[in-house]
Structure formats: structure tokens, C-alpha cells
């Protein structure tokens, strides 16, 4: 797991990228270009780092589909 400040930066970045696109598909593609993904797990949607899909933290509730 990443440190809290790093996690905060990642969450802020991921959320900001959502505001730059029109739909979920574009958002996921944009995140992949920056080395991130939204992983669907048993615990819900998580932010993951590519290429190994390492889970960083949960996706904030307001962005969950």
C-alpha cells in the first residue's frame, strides 16, 4: 500500500481526470494512459496501478457506478 499523502494525490488525480471526459469508458482509457485503472473487486471498485493491477485504495463513493 502507498503512503497516505501519495494516496491522496492519486485520488485527487483520478477524480480530476473524470471531470475531463464525457463518459466512463473515456475515463478508464485516460487513466490507463497514465498508468492507473479502476478494478472491480468483491469489495467494490478500487483504484489500481498498472501494469500489475496493484490496488492502491477504494474509489470514492461519488465516482462508483
Image (tube, rainbow, N blue to C red):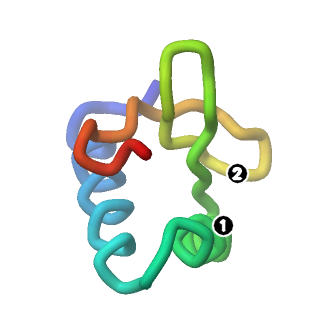
Residue displayed at 60% across by 14% down = 42
Question: Which of the 4 quarters of the picture holds residue 26?
Answer: bottom right
- Picture quadrant where residue 30 is located: bottom right
Given residues 17 and 3, the one toward you in this image is 17
Q: Is residue 10 above or below residue 40?
A: below
Q: Earlier in the sequence, mark 1 or mark 2?
A: 1
Give the residue number, with chain letter if any, for mark 2. Answer: 50
Specify the quadrant of the image occupied by residue 54: top right
**Circle 1 sits in a helix, a strand or a loop, which is it?**
helix
Q: Which residue is mark 1?
A: 32
Q: Mark 2 falls on what kind of element? A: loop
Question: Is residue 19 toward the left or the right of residue 42 in the image?
Answer: left
Q: Nearer the viewer, residue 16 or 54?
A: 16
Task: State if disc 2 and disc 1 touch (CB < 8 Å).
Answer: yes
Q: Is residue 34 above or below residue 58?
A: below
Where is residue 25 shown, x and y percent of the image?
61, 70
Note whether 2 is above or below 32 in the view shown: above
Image position, residue 15 (x, y; %): 30, 62
Amino acid at each position: 500500500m502507498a503512503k497516505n499523502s501519495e494516496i491522496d494525490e492519486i485520488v485527487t488525480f483520478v477524480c480530476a481526470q473524470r471531470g475531463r471526459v464525457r463518459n466512463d469508458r473515456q475515463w478508464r482509457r485516460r487513466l490507463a494512459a497514465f498508468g492507473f485503472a479502476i478494478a472491480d473487486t468483491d469489495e467494490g471498485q478500487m483504484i489500481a496501478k498498472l501494469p500489475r493491477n496493484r490496488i492502491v485504495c477504494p474509489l470514492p463513493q461519488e465516482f462508483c457506478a
